[in-house]
Each structure stands twice: as C-alpha cells, then as structure tokens.
Image (cartoon, grey):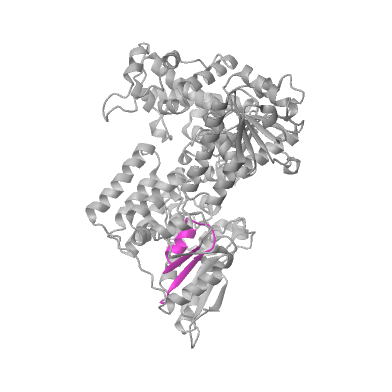
C-alpha cells in the first residue's frame, strides 16, 4: 500500500514521498560534548546540538521529515550519554546567525492526504518534546531568527537565551493557513501568559509582525538576552551558572481563571472576525487550541494540534498561503526585469520636491534608510519649515520607541534640511524625487526646473500614482534618467514600490531605482509606464463597480460590505476615506481618459469632493446606527436599481478578472505572479486567498470573465 493511501504513515514514508527534491535541504544535528566554564571540581558537561543544513548563513535552516529523523538519531545518542551520567545538560543552537525557520514549506506543499499531514505533526511533536524530557535541563541558545517550528524547538527546552540582535522571533503560521502545530499553542500560554500567547500566535501573524529579543525578554519568552559578539560562549557560561544554582530563573504565574481566560480568547476572536469575517480557518482553529491550553495536559494538547494540522496541511488556504509567502519572501527579492545591479549609481545626497505630508514621509524613509543628506524644497519657507519639522519629529518618535539610539537620532536630524531654492538645495544630488500635487502640468514643470540644476547623471524620480511618466519627461534634455517610483501609503508600512520604466529610461537609471528600493527595505516590482500601473488600476476598477452599485441605488452598507467574505483588510468605503475622495476621483478621471469604456468617475464621489467631505462613512456613528454620514446622505443622488451583496461581489470580481487580463496582455508586468505580488504587498491582499489570480482561477471567476485561467493548474505553489 502506498504512503498516500495508508491510514498510518511512517516518517520513512514521508521521506520517500518527498524524494530527491528534498535531499539537498536536509538539516543535520551534529552533537559535541562541551565542558561548561566556572565552578570547581568535576566539570559539568553539556551535549551541544547544532542545527546545520550545509547552506550559507543567509538561507534559514528548515525542518522537514528527513531532518526530524536526523534529530531523532541525535537525541538517541544524547539520551545514551545522559543515562551513562556523561552529560548533565543538553543545548541546541543554530548555524551562524540563524536558529531555525521552522517547517520546510516545500515539503509542506508536497503533503496531499490527512494521513500524511498527521504523520508530519506527530513526528514534530515526538522529537521536539524529547528536548524537555531527557531527564536533564535543556537550553535553547537562540543565535538568530527563530520562526514557526524553529521557535517551537526553543519552547520545548527548559531555558532559552537569545542574542540581542535578533529581531525575528515569532509564530507566523496563522498567516500561512496553519497553526503552530509542534507544541506552540499548548506550551506558550503556560510560559508567557495567555495575552502574550494570543499576540504571538494570532494577532502578530495577521499584522505581519515579529518579536525582538528585548520584547521576548519582557514577556518571558526567553530568560536572558546576551550580546551577539560572544553569544554562544556567554550562553554556555550562563547555562553553567543555572546548573550550579548561581542563577535562579523565576517564571510568572499565568493562570487568571477560566472566565478571564475565555474572555481574552473571545475578545481576540471578535477582532479576527472584524478583519476576516470567517474567511480563513487557521486563526479560529488556533484560538480554540489556545482556549484548550488552560486545561489540557501535554498529551491532549499535542493530540489536538495533530488533529488541526491533519486538516489544515491539506487545505486550499494553506496552498494559497504558501504561494503568497513564496512570492513575498522569494520573488520579491529577485525582481523580474531588474537590470544588473552593478549598473546602479551611488546615492550620496537626496532631494525631495515638496514638503507636504507625503513628501515628509518619503524624506523620513530616505533619511533613515540611506543615512545621507536629504533636503526638501517647496514654494515658501513656512511649508518647508513644516515639512522639515515633520521629518525631525518622525526621527524623535523613532528614538522614543527605541528604534533609534539618541546619537543616531541626533545625527539623522542634522542631515535633513529645507530650502525654497532648488538650485542651492539640489546641487550635488544623485537622486531627486518629486511628491507634488498629482497634476501632469505641475509635475512636468517641476522636473524641467530640477533638470536645470542637477548633474546629467542625477536620477529624477516621480511618485505619481496614475500619470504618464513618459509625458512628464517630454522636453527634458535627459529623459533617460526619469523613472516612476510609486510608494503606497503609509510609506513606512507598506513594502511595495512600483518602478515604472518609460521607453526612454536607461538601465543605469533603472538599476539605481532598484538599488534605492532595496536600501529602503522595499520590494520593487517593475511595471511598464501605463495609466495607474497595476495596484491603483485594479483598485479603481473594483472600487468603481462598488461605487457604481451604490450610485445605482444599492444601500451603502450592502455595497460596502459585499466583499466582506473575502477577508480584505478594509472595505471600499473605508479605503476611500483613507486615500481621500479627491485623490480617488483624480485617479478615476485619469483612468477614464485612458479607458473610457471601463472607468467612469462616480458622480457621488465628485459631490463629496465638492462639499469638502472626507468620505462616505461617519467615523463617529454609534454601533448599530446608519454609518452613512448625514451630510453625504443629504447630497448624494442614487438610482432605483439596487443590487444584492452577491451581485455586487460577482460584479467586482469579474471586473478585476477582466482588468488583470488586460494588464497582462498589455505587458504592464512580466508575469502573472507580479500582479499577485503587487496586491499582496501594496494593499494587503489576504494571504489566505493566495493572491488575486489564483483566487480568480479557483473560484471560476477567471473563466467566466475571460474564458481562461490565469495560471496553469499547480502553478500557485511553492517554487
């Protein structure tokens, strides 16, 4: 009987299932006896296990079935040494600068049956739990990122040290369509308390957040933070002091009682509901496992995790989450179409045209990441002073939150300045980006003025969201150094930059743009210079359908809530308020001029803009009351053809499918996956949907709207 049909799948069957494709990713666990420093008399000996996959330090160590069998062999050897009295403790650490990143997602993607999934879950539990059940204290020396199953390795140990420079500790499984299934949901509440466990297991993954070493110490996730320069040596010395009783680790009491426990879980569930509307199962399953952690013993808790993993490891949501993870962690680091990085010019001085809110955000990011002089310009001294003040206040806020040292904050504040004289301001600049009003004539005039005062090699970038970059460069002496560099709001949070190449843009300019994007810690996607590029074009298409349904007479709550089953990060009307009705109307008008058959400005948005209102919804409306702002209700005009929520949703999805097909046919991006990457990074398209295009394929909308799928079967998987 094959492994795919047997009810009881052995670990060896899993290794055979994965075959040679996984052979190069097997993690080994060499063991060495280490005498612990300090003390007198016979030395204490610790059996030190190192997780080593033979790959460079930049590649995180992962744990697949073959690796877990290697861990079993290592622990068998350690158990013999413990039984013989040869070692008094066991420790586990990672290769240089990496602890472990958890389960190998490529292995996970090969699991196809619940029996195989259960075998993976049991294998992880059976081996990791032994770290805490060898009869001697165990120590996790967390020398680098520890995510997912990697952090669960540490949780099974008696004690944990962490290097001070580690910023990636976390359990991201819920964002992928999984739960922490190798002991995390059961062990964590007893260690750090329920509130912190809820944060680490559910809230942080859905917000794409991880925990730093300092934060981990504060909540009790680790016992001590040690300096990275001699981290392992200091960890071994600390372990010796613990074993000799010179250091006593005190753990907090974490059981607040059944009522408080249930109330805390229910409160987080309500927040998850408000965001996902039940669209993704993993966070809900994780919450129930955390609820059980108060009363389950270890065997029952681990068995419950096995049951959940047996379901989720073969779910569509996991396949979607893995596809999204692969795009945002791998493809985003290798932008399609980017020129040779060696062509990039150095950027030692930056100019920002404009000193408004967006310009100030850009200046703060450029200042913080590039750490070079940044100068803002605007029409009058008052605006310039306000812009520079916002940047310096941003620097001060980073220092208050511990993201910058006082010395670094002082140095950065001194690097930002402002001027009303572009000639003086931009002399010697290597990179100038404009962030002025979204008007073609204004932007064209700005670039023409800047060109007169900068060197021929200085890159001229525009943050336009919808206008033609080529049209802005018309008439310039050097149009080849103009490039679109479109950020998303809020600039410090959203990781996407659309890099727009015109027919004239040369490779050196483009390479410099990608180099700046990488230095800013952004993910860049190359797009052809086309109206609204990718993200805003798709957003305006589906938002336009929702707004049109409202204009036709669909109640506001019905139109705005029609897409709730998808679990999008915000509703169309909430997004309208965020970007501002005037900006939304301008983009609609730009797209209408380019594609009049598919984009039409909403007359009701135009009325809201004319009235100076911030959007459709009343932010102060009481719960249960009508949300439409009374001022909006008094001025909008609607028809008599209402639609149901299902009709609005189908209409919006069909429009998305049509527009995505046109974007690909026009060559706006090089690959369908870049459409998904843009939406995942630019607007927070839910990872559990696996990107827009796989969802449209899976739901049948792609074929209904365009007559064919976007991706071949199986393409939306790990690569």
Instruction: Examine the rendering and report whether any part of residue 348 can be seen.
Output: yes
Is residue 59 within the magenta segment?
no
Number of residue marks = 0
Quadrant of the rendered image containing residue 340: top right
**Image coords of residue 65 (percent x, y):** 52, 61
Above or below, 74 against 607 in this view is below
| In this rendering, position of residue 477 left or right of residue 714 | right
| In this rendering, position of residue 291 left or right of residue 26 | left
Q: Nearer the viewer, residue 60 or 420?
A: 420
Give the residue furthest to the bottom: 41
**Image coords of residue 538 (percent x, y):** 53, 26
Residue range (magenta): 135-162
**Image coords of residue 439 (percent x, y):** 59, 19
**Image coords of residue 580 (percent x, y):** 46, 24
Above or below, 37 against 625 in this view is below
Q: Nearer the viewer, residue 465 or 206?
A: 465
């Amino acid at each position: 009987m094959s492994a795919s049909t047997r009810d009881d799948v052995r670990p060896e069957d899993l290794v055979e299932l994965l075959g040679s494709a996984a052979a190069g990713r097997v993690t080994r666990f060499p063991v060495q006896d280490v005498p612990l420093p300090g003390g007198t008399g016979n030395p204490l000996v610790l059996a030190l296990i190192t997780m080593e996959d033979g790959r460079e330090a930049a590649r995180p160590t992962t744990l697949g079935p073959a690796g877990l069998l290697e861990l079993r062999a290592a622990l068998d050897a350690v158990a013999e040494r413990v039984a013989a009295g040869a070692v008094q403790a066991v420790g586990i650490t990672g290769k240089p600068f990496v602890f472990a990143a958890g389960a190998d997602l490529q292995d996970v993607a090969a699991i196809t049956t619940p029996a195989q999934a259960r075998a993976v879950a049991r294998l992880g539990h059976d081996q990791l739990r032994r770290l805490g059940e060898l009869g001697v204290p165990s120590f996790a020396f967390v020398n680098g990122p520890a995510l997912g199953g990697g952090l669960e390795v540490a949780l099974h140990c008696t004690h944990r040290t962490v290097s001070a420079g580690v910023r990636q500790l976390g359990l991201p499984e819920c964002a992928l369509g999984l739960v922490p299934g190798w002991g995390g949901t059961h062990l964590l509440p007893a260690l750090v308390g329920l509130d912190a466990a809820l944060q680490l297991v559910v809230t942080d993954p859905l917000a794409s957040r991880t925990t730093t070493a300092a934060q981990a110490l504060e909540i009790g996730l680790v016992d001590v933070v040690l300096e990275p320069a001699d981290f392992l040596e200091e960890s071994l010395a600390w372990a010796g002091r613990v074993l000799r009783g010179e250091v006593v680790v005190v753990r907090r009491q974490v059981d607040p009682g059944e009522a408080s426990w249930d109330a805390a879980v229910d409160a987080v569930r309500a927040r998850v509901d408000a965001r996902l509307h039940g669209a993704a199962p993993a966070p809900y399953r994780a919450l129930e496992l955390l609820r059980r952690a108060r009363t389950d013993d270890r065997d029952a808790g681990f068995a419950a995790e096995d049951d959940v993993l047996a379901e989720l490891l073969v779910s569509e949501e996991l396949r979607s989450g893995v596809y999204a993870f692969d795009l945002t962690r791998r493809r985003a680091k290798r932008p399609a179409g980017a020129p040779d990085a060696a062509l990039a010019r150095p950027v030692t001085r930056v100019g920002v045209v404009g000193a408004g809110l967006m310009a100030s955000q850009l200046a703060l990011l450029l200042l913080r990441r590039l750490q070079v002089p940044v100068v803002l310009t605007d029409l009058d001294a008052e605006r310039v002073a306000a812009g520079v003040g916002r940047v310096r206040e941003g620097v001060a806020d980073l220092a208050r939150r511990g993201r910058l040292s006082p010395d670094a904050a002082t140095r950065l504040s001194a690097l930002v300045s402002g001027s009303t004289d572009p000639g003086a301001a931009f002399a010697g600049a290597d990179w100038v980006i404009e962030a002025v009003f979204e008007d073609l004539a204004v932007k064209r005039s700005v670039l023409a003025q800047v060109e007169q005062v900068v060197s021929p090699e200085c890159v001229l970038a525009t943050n336009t969201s919808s206008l033609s970059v080529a049209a802005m460069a018309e008439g310039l002496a050097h149009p080849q150094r103009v490039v679109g560099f479109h950020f998303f709001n809020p600039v410090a949070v959203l990781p996407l930059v659309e890099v727009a190449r015109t027919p004239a843009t040369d490779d050196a300019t483009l390479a410099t743009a990608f180099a700046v994007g990488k230095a800013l810690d952004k993910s860049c996607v190359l797009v052809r210079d086309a109206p609204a590029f990718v993200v805003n074009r798709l957003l305006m298409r589906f938002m336009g359908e929702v707004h049109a349904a409202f204009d036709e007479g669909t109640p506001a709550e019905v139109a705005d809530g029609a897409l709730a089953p998808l679990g999008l990060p915000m509703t169309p009307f909430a997004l309208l308020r965020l970007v501002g009705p005037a900006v939304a109307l301008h983009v609609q008008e730009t797209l209408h001029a380019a594609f009049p058959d598919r984009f039409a400005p909403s007359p009701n948005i135009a009325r809201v803009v004319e009235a100076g209102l911030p959007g459709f919804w009343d932010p102060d409306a009481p719960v249960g009351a009508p949300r439409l702002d009374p001022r909006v209700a008094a001025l909008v005009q609607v028809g008599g053809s209402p639609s149901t929520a299902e009709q609005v949703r189908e209409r919006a999805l069909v429009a998305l499918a049509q527009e995505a097909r046109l974007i690909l046919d026009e060559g706006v991006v090089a690959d369908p996956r870049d459409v998904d990457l843009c939406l995942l990074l630019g607007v927070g398209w839910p990872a559990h949907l696996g990107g827009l295009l796989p969802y449209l394929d899976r739901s049948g909308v792609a074929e209904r709207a365009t007559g064919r799928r976007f991706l071949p079967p199986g393409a939306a998987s790990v690569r």
